[in-house]
Image (cartoon, rainbow, N blue to C red):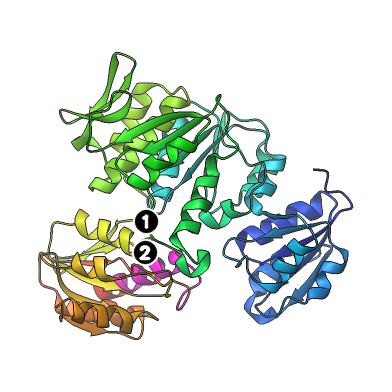
Amino acid sequence: MDVKGKRVLIVGLARSGTAACEELVKLGAKVTVTDVKKEDELKDAIKKLEGKDVKFVLGNHPLSLLEDVDLIVTSPGVPMDIELLEKAREKRIPIISELELGFWFNKAPIIAVTGTNGKTTTTTLIGEILKNDGKNISVAGNIGIPFIQEADRIGVKDYIVLEVSSFQLENIINFKPKIAVILNITEDHINYHKTFENYIKAKSRIFENQTEEDYLILNYDDPIVFSLSKFAKSKVVYFSRKTELNQGVFVKNGVIVIKEHDKILPILKAKEVGIKGLHNLENALASVAACWAAGTNLNAMAETLKDFKGVEHRLEYVDTVDGVKFINDSKGTNPDAAIKALEAIDDPIILIAGGYDKNADFKPFVRAFFGRVKKVILIGQTADKIERTAKEEGFYQIEKASSMQEAVIKAKNSAIAGDTVLLSPACASWDMFKNFEERGKVFKEAVYSLKEKI
């Protein structure tokens, strides 16, 4: 679509909204931005757009904004049932996500990764494997660099690797990855999507525009993900941690292998994978499947899988203080992700959890405490809810803290040498922090300050 001279309304001035704004202005669009937050809450974003021909309507979403609009671009997380967007649909004004906008201007084949958990690790790992194979690639999307920003900048490359969320996928029209990856689907963002079925539907949009020339990588072990294969027009490639497949990527006699027709291609021993934990083995298998579909050299896969040590804020080792290990898993923003973090640690755990309430069910999370967690320090909006659930399930070793700094001190005081203090909140960060990155950084700073006091 030629956006020159078009009147575009951007709803939500987050990171992707700001990037969309910059690119649209550059392309000659007449841009208006609206956000429910007020000017003093959006200083950084507004400063970034200083000197650009942009109109700001902040503090609310007046319906008068729809009087003169050709296109609406939404930022991830903006609820689709707000009155402004409902009225826009009635008026048949096109509503797209920044992901779709980026696709309009993208020239490179896309590898897109989604799932409830493991997206950032898998996206990064795929990018590293492709780079090590000498491919000219870019990594963007929900991982930090907005797609539209990269799409305008990169030109033709071998691949662009994108982390994509359910929020971004909800408002696509033509978005079509050459290789789509769905890692897993468990309950998350129910406060936004309203039902689990809506969430599944949003995730599955990643492959709805694919054709038989494209690839869909699916987790054979996840019943919901596996069931999506019946809707695929593309070539389906399965990966499995638990089953030896007729075709696909799996573990055979402790070795990660690719099976294509009657040929078995060994990659490396599963225990040699640099990122630890069963969930990370699944992420590694998915990465191998995606890179195999992209025609990647097997040696590049093996070397990268050995050397790759993970991403910041995902089971990230921070420091050891008085024999107590501190692990930052701030990216554990839902119960299932936090359970996987608990399962990946062998030491007795002092857990720091809690945060923004996404209407999650915390029972499975609490049940994972037994035999692993010595004590829980709770913070944030969900502290009371998790405490109540824990007591109902028979877990009573609980303290509360009013800040991350206080939580780290209480966790350290509850730990002995050989224990691990794990931040894995099972919740989003938006009640106390801008994002999970800020939450992780505050945790790490609090740990480093402990060492300074020794």
Q: Where is residue 263 in the image (x, y as percent from the top left)?
A: 30, 14
Please state which of residues 322 and 268 is positioned toward the viewer in this rendering. 268
Residue at 74% across, 56% down: 22
Residue at 27% across, 85% down: 400
Mark in the foreground, 2 or 1: 1
Q: Quadrant of residue 451?
A: bottom left
Q: In this view, does 351 lie to the left or right of 346?
A: right
Give the extent of the magenta segment: 431-448
One can see residue 115 in this view = yes
The three-letter amino acid code for the residue at tag 1 is Thr
Q: Where is residue 411 in the image (x, y as percent from the top left)?
A: 21, 76
Among numbered discs 2 and 1, the one appearing first in the sequence: 1
Does residue 23 lie above or below 267 as drawn?
below
One can see residue 276 in this view = no
The three-letter amino acid code for the residue at tag 2 is Asn
Q: In this view, does 312 lie to the left or right of 84?
A: left
> What residue did someone put label 2 on?
334
Q: Position of residue 331 (x, y in %)?
A: 38, 60
Q: Distance between the residues labelled 2 and 1?
A: 9 Å
Q: Mark 2 falls on what kind of element?
A: loop
Q: Residues within 10 Å of mark 1 (few under 14, many from 20)?
A: some
Q: In this view, does 266 lie to the left or right of 15?
A: left
Discs 2, 1 touching: Cβ within 8 Å: yes
Q: How crowded is mark 2: few (under 14 residues within 10 Å), some or many (20 or more)?
A: many
Residue at 41% across, 72% down: 359
> What residue did someone put label 1 on?
186
